[in-house]
Image (cartoon, rainbow, N blue to C red):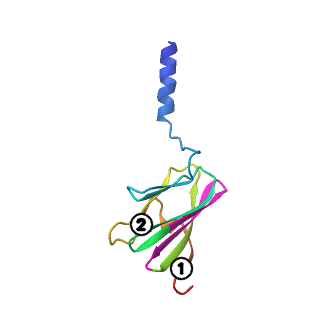
């Protein structure tokens, strides 16, 4: 009986959808070119990564009202766009896959339509 209870508890623990609240707020896997943001981690950090025709910068601003706020900046050949994004702290990890080759658009696990456009500009004229 005792074994059954322990087994049941282990199975239930493995089935729950838990979001790790520890670990890095932002990480980068160089092999796959994926930036990962953990919404559960309340941290202020800024990282940037380049790709052949531009770059992506992510700046976490911390938690506010049950969500992680972060700035997402996408730059291509000098022109950039900055978005302010909110992701509930209970959501799964956020990912940004950097483009490869001649592509210029990163793939995001979040919809940019849900983010607030902060500004657009040019690194050459600002």
> Is residue 56 on the magenta stretch?
no
Residue 117 is situated, as x and y percent measured from the top left of the image, at 55, 73
Q: Residue at (38%, 56%) from the top-left corner?
A: 32
Question: To which residue does mark 2 refer?
Answer: 106
- Name the chief secondary structure element in magenta: strand
Quadrant housing residue 82: bottom right
Badge 2: how crowded within 10 Å, few (<14), some, or many (20+)?
A: some
Question: To which residue does mark 1 refer?
Answer: 120
Residue 109 is situated, as x and y percent measured from the top left of the image, at 45, 58
Badge 1: how crowded within 10 Å, few (<14), some, or many (20+)?
A: some
Quadrant housing residue 51: bottom left
> Is residue 71 on the magenta stretch?
yes
First to last magenta residue range? 57-77
On the rendered structure, is 90 left or right of 7?
Answer: right
- In terms of sequence position, does the residue under pointer 2 or pointer 1 come before the other? 2
Q: Quadrant of the C terminus?
A: bottom right
């Amino acid at each position: 009986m005792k074994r059954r209870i322990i087994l049941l508890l282990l199975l239930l623990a493995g089935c729950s959808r838990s979001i790790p609240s520890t670990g890095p707020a932002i990480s980068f896997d160089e092999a796959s070119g994926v930036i990962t943001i953990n919404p559960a981690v309340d941290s202020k950090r800024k990282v940037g990564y380049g790709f052949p025709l531009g770059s992506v910068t992510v700046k976490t601003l911390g938690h506010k009202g049950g969500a992680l706020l972060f700035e997402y900046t996408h730059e291509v050949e000098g022109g950039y766009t900055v978005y302010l994004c909110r992701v509930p702290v209970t959501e799964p990890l956020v990912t940004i896959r950097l483009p490869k080759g001649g592509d210029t658009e990163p793939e995001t696990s979040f919809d940019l339509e849900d983010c607030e456009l902060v500004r657009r500009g040019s690194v050459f004229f600002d």
